[in-house]
Each structure stands twice: as structure tokens, then as C-alpha cells.
Amino acid sequence: MPDECIFCRIAAGEAPADVVYEDENFIAFRDILPQAPTHILVIPRMHIASSAELGRGQEQLAGGLIIIAKSLAEKEGMAHRGYRLVINCGSEGAQQVPHLHLHLIGGRQLSGALG
Amino acid sequence: MPDECIFCRIAAGEAPADVVYEDENFIAFRDILPQAPTHILVIPRMHIASSAELGRGQEQLAGGLIIIAKSLAEKEGMAHRGYRLVINCGSEGAQQVPHLHLHLIGGRQLSGALG
């Protein structure tokens, strides 16, 4: 765990966050700068810098991000209205924190423009 | 396979597409209305209407979308520059085709606005 990684610190309970889900491998919390009524980040507890660091054999971990986000969308009452899942990677992807995270965004009509 | 699903027809080789990857379970092809220099859709061959239809136990399938997109980003020369992965779900998520698909978008600086 890199000491300077804010998401590792949240996962370790050492930095505050509005946590909405956690299990052995993942934790999810609300984005502090929400872009929509619901804006949750789902992260692996393990420090993985970005999706570029994922390899063959990590499908289960990567898919866990999606399945957890899907369940959280239901809890947020967005399953039927719809929502968006986003993983930003690197500079041109506008990734803000270098710890893999999936954005769950919804609660309003989202644009068809994806960035 | 719903006969009317265009992505099922592409997966079956019955509709044209600029296919960039395929294996037993997945196929990837270029979006016909690209929003960036690289805009590829990765889909499961199996008809799943959206991420809302995914369940516990389908982490491997969901994660496959991400891992394949990550590999395609490398082939497109975007791994170091960065890119974005997006799954739109339902009406408010601006999902256009009701067959689960992951957008791989890159090749230019993407906005921090996620929709």
C-alpha cells in the first residue's frame, strides 16, 4: 500500500469517506465532487494504479467492480431509470486518482457524450 | 438470440462490422459513430440486455469486457496516453443498443465531465 494513496488510506479506514459498501476485496464510497445525484466510486482494496495495470487472470477482480456497482445502482433506486459506469485511465482518460476506480453515476438524465 | 438485436447479428457474423477482436465469448468492433479517434465496443456474444441484467457469479464475464478493452487500448497505442471505459445502462444512462456493451474511447484528451 503506497502511503500517499488516498484511496488506499480510505480502504484502510485511515481517511474519512462516506462508505456505502465494503467486503474483503472492495470498498465503495461517495465521490466528494459528485457530477450527478448519485456518484459512487467502487475500488479494489488492493493498490492497482489503473486499468492499464490489469492482466489476464484478473477478470474476477475487474468484474467485481461492475457487479458491485450494479447492486449499488439497485440500492440507489436507479436500476430501472438507468445509470453509467466509467473507468478513467491515465492522463488522456482524465483519471484523477492513481488507484483503479469505477464511477457509478446516475440520478439524472446523462448525456450521450462520453467525454 | 433475439433476431432483432443488431449486436447479436454482428456477433453471429450476419451484420457487417469492423471487428478488431473476437474469441469464444466476446467480440469487439469499431463504433459506427465514433466520439474519438478510437471508439471500440466490446460485447459478450451472449445476449444480455444491460449491466442491470448481470448477477453475482458473472464477474468473470463482466471483467472480460474490461480486460479485453485494456488489451485493445494497448494495440491502439493508448495504454500510456490514457483512455476511458464506459458502460451505459438504460434510459438515463443513454444506452443506445439493448445488448450489454463497453465503450473503449481514446486517442484524444477526454473531458473530466462524465455525462
Image (tube, coloured by chain):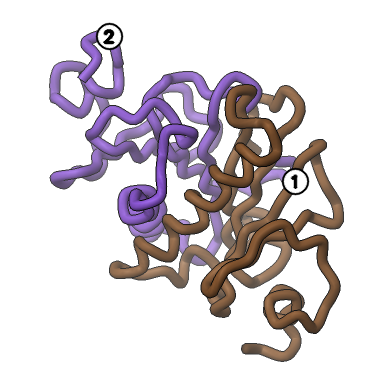
Chain colours: A brown, B purple
Percent of width and height locating residue B97: 43, 20
Residue A72 appears anywhere in the view: yes
- Residue B4, labelled with which disc? 2
Q: Chain of mark 1?
A: A
Quadrant (top left, top right, bottom left, bottom right) of the N terminus of chain B: top left
User: At 14% across and 45% down in the image, what residue appears?
Assistant: B24
User: At 64% across and 23% down in the image, what residue appears?
Assistant: A81
Q: Nearer the viewer, residue B14 or A63?
A: A63
Percent of width and height locating residue B17: 25, 25
**For residue A19, above or below residue B43:** below
- Residue B7, labelled with which disc? none
- In what element is the residue under mark 2? loop
User: At 85% across and 72% down in the image, what residue appears?
Assistant: A16
Which amino acid is tagged 2? Glu
**For residue A73, above or below residue B1:** below
As measured in the structure, the alpha-carbon distance from the residue carrying label 1 to the one carrying label 2 is 34 Å
Which amino acid is tagged 1? His
Residue marked by disc 1: A39
Q: Chain of mark 2?
A: B
Classify residue A32 by image quadrant: bottom right
Query: In the figure, is residue A2 to the left or right of A58?
Result: right
**For residue A49, above or below residue A64:** below
Query: In the figure, is residue B60 to the left or right of B114?
Result: left
